[in-house]
Image (tube, rainbow, N blue to C red):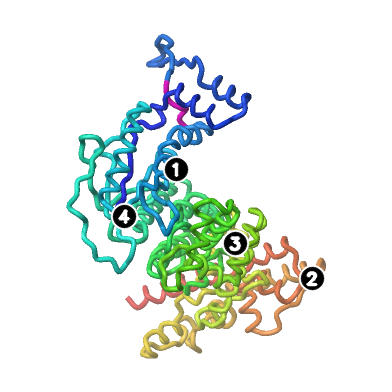
Amino acid sequence: MYVATLDASKAFDVVNHAKLKDKLYKTGICAPLWNTVDNLYNNCQEVVRWEGAYSREYSIEQGVRQGGILSPHLYKLYINQLLDTLSSNRIGLEIGNIYVGTPTCADDQLLLADDTSILQHMLDVAHDYANKHHYHLHPMKSKTTHHVISKKSKTESPDVQWKLGEEVVTHDQQYTHLGLEWMESKTAPDLQAKIDSSRGAAYALLGVGLHGQNGLDPATSYQIIQVFITPRLIYGLDGVVLGRKDTDTLELFYRRLLRQIQGLADTVANPAVYLLLNAIPLEAQIHMRTLGLWGSVTRLEEDHPLKKLATRQLALKDKKSHSWFIYVEDICYKYGLEMHNINAFPWPKLAWKTHVRTVVTAFWKKQLFEQATSMSSLAHMVLDEEGTNKIWSVCKGKSHLVEAATIRARMVTGKYTLQATRARYNQHSVDPTCPLCGKEAEDIQHLLLVCEALEQRRTPQLAQLNNLMDDLRHDAPLEIPANKEEWCMAILNGGTFIRNHTVVGRDKHDLLEIAFSRFCFALHKERDFIINNILIQRV
């Protein structure tokens, strides 16, 4: 497949007002709307301000307003005749008998052909149209590429020079369309460029506190990531067929970002990274967008090229095809959605988006829950009825609680290093006995409830916990942990554990979360202090 991207120099600035109004009139627009656009651009004048001084007024005879809501739509109207000419004459790429040669949005124009001479013909038509409509196609900024459309294709780039008028168009192995960077040798966009861009956005947000334990709390940081970084990372991927390797590459970056804002080690089990934040994997978010796009296709008119293309591809392509529609069919099957029924009987937009969000979220929550319950490192993690753990929930807007909650998060994910842990990782060549009291193996239950060396710090902390739980029992039925194992689970999981056993309101839940985090942090500090003293004495 041969590709040409067209760069119109200062595209929005060179739209001729008279021709624009004429084209608007020929569309059959009603008089009031035509008059509105006419008034918007008729007798426009502007001045230049420079160092407090103003130039004389001068008239604006061309261009649509940069950043205006109507501007992209008016520009589309301005170049639609070019696209209609190519389409009506079937000049360009076709899939079966469906014309797909000009996938264009406003000034981001793309020409597709399966023959070198046809692409040159398309460039000639575009160049002629630009001259008649008083705008210039830049041959150096426009690009041509021989794009591989199949992973099995080994065809080399042809030795052809395409031209715009008399000037040769730049041939490049890489081009950009609708914000996605493509390589001629790849069937998916350049994902590394998207990762680099997202990483740059994350660095730019360091100033507002997006830097883990010493910055904003993880819950707030996650919301910032979802607003400013995730959209940049997955933009445009809803219309792309992603392989397993592509998805894993993006997921690795996203998961590492979530680890960093939570202060979690790289060795923490993947399900915990999402469950502590009540998050879902990036793959799920891409699937939501892909299914949303499929919903838009199903709502198109039957004679729309995309709707006809969907019907054709689903009827003719097999499961091994690289077609986007087969890719969507696989996604629908994964989530138990009837793709063909949806195509025949389209859902309303809002209802479809809501249904997709519910189905996809439930699928991944169940998946993460099953993975977490099967992992020995997460044996101490308790999840609520929503499949999440609420360690970070009370830290929102309270950065002073983050440090304590981080220690508890490390404990609950099995990554708080204790002597028993060292022994297990070193194939029991290390003595698992507690270095503080020297009486038994130092595991998490020993640290929290048994170690005699920590008793002086533990006793008042436990008394405070008991007093808090006694106070809460007056307002709601609250079951006090009956043994050391239950106490250990309650301390590590806070209100999540208590809430799963008794009815506790949200405000009571938050008080328990704060108290248990402070308890874990107090013992952690005391343990560090004693171990440091032991090391100093040895020296």
Can residue 435 be seen by looking at this rendering?
A: yes
Give, as a three-letter code, the residue at label 3.
Asn
Residue 449 as seen in the image, left or right of residue 537: right
276 to the left or right of 248: right
User: Along the polypeptide, which appears first: circle 3 or circle 2?
Assistant: 3
Secondary structure type for disc 3: helix
Residue assigned mark 2: 473
**Which amino acid does the dot numbered 4 rest on?**
Asp
Q: Which residue is mark 4?
A: 114
Q: CA distance from mark 4 to mark 1?
A: 21 Å
| Foreground disc of the pair 3, 1 | 3
Reading the image, the residue beneath label 3 is: 343
- Residue at (41%, 14%) from the top-left corner? 52
The reply to whether the C-beta atoms of the residues labelled 4 and 1 are less than 8 Å apart is: no
Disc 1: CA contacts within 10 A as few (<14), some (14-19) or many (>=20): some
Residue holding disc 1: 105
Q: Does residue 305 appear to the left or right of 167 in the view shown?
A: right
- Magenta residues span 62-67
Question: Residue 19 falls in which quadrant of the image?
Answer: top left
Q: Earlier in the sequence, mark 3 or mark 1?
A: 1
In the image, residue 158 above or below residue 77: below
Q: Identity of the amino acid at label 2?
A: Arg
* CA separation in Å, label 2 and label 4: 75 Å
Could you say which quadrant of the image residue 267 lies in? bottom left
